[in-house]
Amino acid sequence: MSVSERPSAAPPTPAEQPSLLEARDVTRVYRLGKDIEVHALRGVSFEVDRGDHVAIMGSSGSGKSTLLNLLGALDRPTSGEVRYDGQEVRELSDTALAELRNQRIGFVFQSFQLLPRLTALDNVALPLVYRPGTPRDRRARAREALAQVGLADRMEHRPGELSGGQQQRVALARAVVTEPALVLADEPTGNLDSVTGEEIMALLESLHTEQGTALVVITHEREIAERADRLIELRDGAIVSSATS
Amino acid sequence: MSLRESLRVALQALVANRLRSLLTTLGVLIGVMSVVLLVAIGQGARSEITGAIEGLGSNLLFVLPGDGEFGSGPSRANFAVDDIERVDRALPAPDGRTAGYVVGAESVQAEGQRVTATVFGVTASYLDVTDRSVARGQSLTSSDVVTGRRIAVIGASTAEELFPGQDPIGRNVSLGSIRFRVTGVLERVGTTAFGPDVDSQVIVPISAAQRLFGTSRVDAIFVRATSTAGIEADRQAVERALTERLDAEEFSVLTQDEIIGVVGDILQILTWVLAAIAGISLLVGGVGVSNIMLVSVSERTREIGLRKALGARTRDITRQFLFEAIALTGIGGLVGLALGVALAQIVAAFAPVPAEVTWWSVALALGVSVLVGLVFGVLPARRAGRLDPVTALRRE
């Protein structure tokens, strides 16, 4: 697949520095019982550089969820390589993968995935719990992130007391509070009406440009996908097109 | 994740499910409470009984049938009246220091009143040797014992029950079908929760008692040493005298300390048995904790998946759930301990049973409750830690 040729928001990378994220000939086979194998991904290759905005589009069953799991370092490929900063994910232990997710990746999910018992502030601070630091620092950073997504006045509310759009904003704040290199958004507008979805996308994109964070959006909606600088289309576990707009 | 953070998260989860946490911890609470309470009662009984033995006087030697070991075999001698004299003659300075008795329960009747009392058939020196005295009337004499006179010295409680508001001296009582004349009333000793009710005893000459019971045996012989230093010499003399007639295994000569040792051991075992029975409920409580923790893990699968996606390591998740289990049992242990101690005080105040809370039962109960959380929390916690984030996140 083509290497990104676009200028990025981050400072230009020296030629010898490896890409932020590189997938090479990635396959993922699920075994369902003895003789049934599902080839969810059949040799996918692409790269994401610092500051890129990439959309991965496909219908359900195209393998985009599988790809998301691999990009999110939640899963390891059956064959091929997924590299973060040149580091092979398959060679990392579970603990190292957890650290990689914590340090480098921010997740945004379709169903928000907020913990209902925690306030917005504590939800945002959650990834910081798995890093060194005092509760005070964590809360200060979470407050800042919530202010960034425009929820400074809802910090002590629980998810049940917030609208869907507000909940997804909390999730965005949680994704960026760790200052990750990459935000992975899985159908971020899937559970929202079109107006709110538009707001969330605008917010995601502004966080991406302001912080220089790479953004990978996984979606089945063409309008959402076309907002990205690069659009990768998946079908039946393989890339059918990759276009830079 | 820091230890403090793990603990905080665990407590938050418990508070979020207040009722469930309360009910789960109840099992452990009741277990710890019963361990503390039953051990306190067992220990209280032990010190009460050993105290009662100590009250007999420290210079006493007990000559008993059997080899005197807890759980000894069936080789027991039957002492005879001759043996009392044999022992007495063998002592370095015989001066009415030896006493023997035969004991049995008998119905005691007088003027329409009827009680069941412990009847002691004794030699004349019995009251002196066991440090008791007659409050009113007369004690037994040697000639009463030799001739087998049917006279009785009765305990203060028995006197009140049989002759309420009257002077029992000179009256007749029937032991079984035989009439005895009351010559004296014993000094009141007061009751203890365990051990013999001394004040309801009836004391008669040993020869008369043997006829009453239809036996010629003597149940035990006491020797009062003149001093603590003289105990060992007396013991050797008694042993020498009795081995002329009996095998060494057929009888034993024990000091008060040795008796306390044997009885104390038996009661200690009793205490442990009580603790073990209470421990079973603690175990059941632990199973309950394990069960609820498994439910909790399965309910919070998505939370676990999310935490892992956000960077929680297997170890962080395992610790979080393990702390939750330990917090459940630890809190149950603390509250159970407090209730157990309080109940022990109430028992000690209102029941004749004394209760002594010992430091080791407190330490044991708390240690075991934390251990129960650890043991029964490990399985659910490990299951939580090993959950695959991909499948966990997708769980609805």
Image: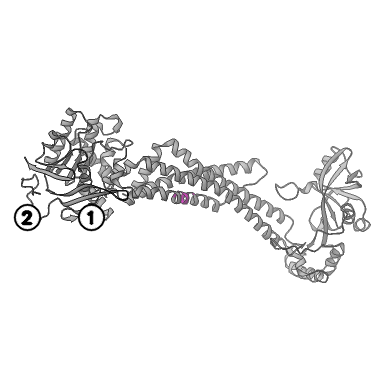
Tell me the amino acid under the disc marked 2: Ala
The chain letter under disc 2 is: A
Image location (x, y in percent) of residue B91:
81, 68
Which residue lies at the image location 50% right of the left edge and 51% below the top edge?
Answer: B368
Which residue lies at the image location 87% right of the left edge and 62% below the top edge?
Answer: B81
CA gap, disc 1 to disc 2? 24 Å
Nearer-N-terminus badge (1/2): 2
Task: Depth check: give the residue in front, B177 or B202.
Answer: B177
In reply to whether residue B363 is colored magenta, the answer given is no
Q: In this view, does B313 lie above or below B66?
A: above
Residue B59 sits in which quadrant? bottom right
Q: Can residue A28 be seen in this view?
A: yes
Coloured how? one colour
Which residue lies at the image location 5% right of the left edge and 47% below the top edge?
Answer: A5
Label 2: how many Cα within 10 Å (few below 14, some 14–19, many 20+):
few
Tell me the amino acid under the disc marked 1: Arg
Horizontally, residue B374 falls left or right of residue A110, namely right
The chain letter under disc 1 is: A
Task: Depth check: give the residue in front, A196 or B219.
Answer: A196
Instruction: Label 1: state its secondary structure.
Output: helix
Give the residue pinned by disc 1: A90
Give the residue pinned by disc 2: A15
In reply to whether residue B370 is colored magenta, the answer given is yes
Instruction: Tell me which segment is drawn in magenta.
Output: B369-373
